[in-house]
Amino acid sequence: MGLMDGKKGIVFGIANERSYAYFIAQALVREGAQLAFTYLPLGKMERRVGKAVESLGITDPWLESCDAGNDEDLDRVFTKLGEDFGSIDFVVHSIAFADRDYLKPDMFHKTPRAAFTQAMDVSAYTLVAMAQRAMPIMPNGGSMVSLSYFGGEKVVPGYNVMGVAKACLEHTTRYLAYELGDQGRNIRVNSISAGPFKTLAGAGVGGMDEMIAHQEKKAALKRANTGEEVGNAAVYLLSDMSSGTTGEILYVDCGFNIVGL
Ligand SMILES: NC(=O)c1ccc[n+]([C@@H]2O[C@H](COP(=O)([O-])OP(=O)(O)OC[C@H]3O[C@@H](n4cnc5c(N)ncnc54)[C@H](O)[C@@H]3O)[C@@H](O)[C@H]2O)c1
């Protein structure tokens, strides 16, 4: 028996087999969940994401294109999801974007308005946009999880505008949790603050190798976290195991955030 038996949901954010969303999907499948997926309509994403999803053992997957910065795309995806799945129990928001030109040391103060608002829109507002569309197809309550990073809390040189967007995402999590938990909605909203990890998005952040080395040296467990550990934490937050937990930021960083020096 799996922790997610009988539960259905959608995963945003697989780009390839290194994505945090991939490890989350892998853990959810292992625990018996039924999944829908989206891919960013850009370059070879459809093929890449299709391949990654098939490697999870899912043949003929529910896979739709979706630019989450586009309301029409989100409307189409959630309408089709409602038609095909009836109702859902969870949403995985594992997406973020910022112009990499500004993800370098000493570049935050140069961030133009367009790059700032785009980072906030795609990396934080989309959680609200998804919640609005998921609520009508979550009649039995549910759980939403997003992915954050310590750079949303403290200054991590080079993380810059993405850190500002993560701060927004984390507080968006709390405000959404408050409203979506009320009036019989029973939808929980939490975020995982994961350690640095070499993914496509991670590669766009200047100094990623240094960030990982720093965690290995300083964290309580003296190592980097794995993707599987993030996947398992997501299962906890998306399953009934965490039924009393909402509006929380759960660290999966081997205890890096607790260390002051
Ligand atoms: N890699 C890290 O070091 C790290 C650490 C902590 C948190 N995170 C967070 O984890 C999440 C997943 O990132 P990842 O590291 O797995 O990298 P990734 O590149 O594998 O995933 C990022 C995903 O965001 C998607 N995306 C970007 N813009 C989008 C848009 N407009 N619409 C829809 N999708 C869009 C991409 O297609 C991609 O699938 C992000 O929120 C990221 O900030 C990453």
Image: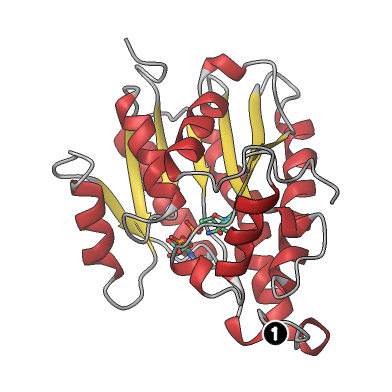
The answer to whether residue 233 is visible is: yes
The amino acid on which the numbered mark 1 sits, given as a three-letter code, is Ala
- Where residue 216 sits in the image (x, y, percent)? 60, 51
Quadrant of the rendered structure where residue 104 is?
Answer: bottom right
Residue assigned mark 1: 114
- Where residue 251 sits in the image (x, y, percent)? 67, 39
- Quarter occupied by the N terminus: top left
Q: What element carries label 1?
A: helix
Q: Give the residue drawn at x 20%, y 56%.
A: 51
Whether 67 is drawn above or below 34: the answer is below
Whether 172 is drawn above or below 1: the answer is below
Q: In this view, does 100 lie to the left or right of 226?
A: right
Quadrant of the rendered structure where residue 50 is?
Answer: bottom left
- Where residue 188 sits in the image (x, y, percent)? 65, 28
The answer to whether residue 137 is visible is: no
- Where residue 240 sits in the image (x, y, percent)? 54, 15
Q: Give the residue drawn at x 70%, y 75%.
A: 158
Q: Give the residue drawn at x 74%, y 60%.
A: 151
Residue farthest toward the top in the current orientation of the protein = 1
Q: Is residue 65 left or right of residue 190?
A: left
Q: Is residue 52 left or right of residue 241?
A: left
Residue farthest toward the left in the current orientation of the protein = 59
Please tell me which residue lies in front, 222 or 53. Answer: 222
Whether 83 is drawn above or below 123: the answer is above
> How would you rate the neighbour count of disc 1 (Cα within 10 Å): few for under 14, some for 14-19, many for 20 or more?
few
Please tell me which residue lies in front, 105 or 185. Answer: 105
Whether 89 is drawn above or below 175: the answer is above
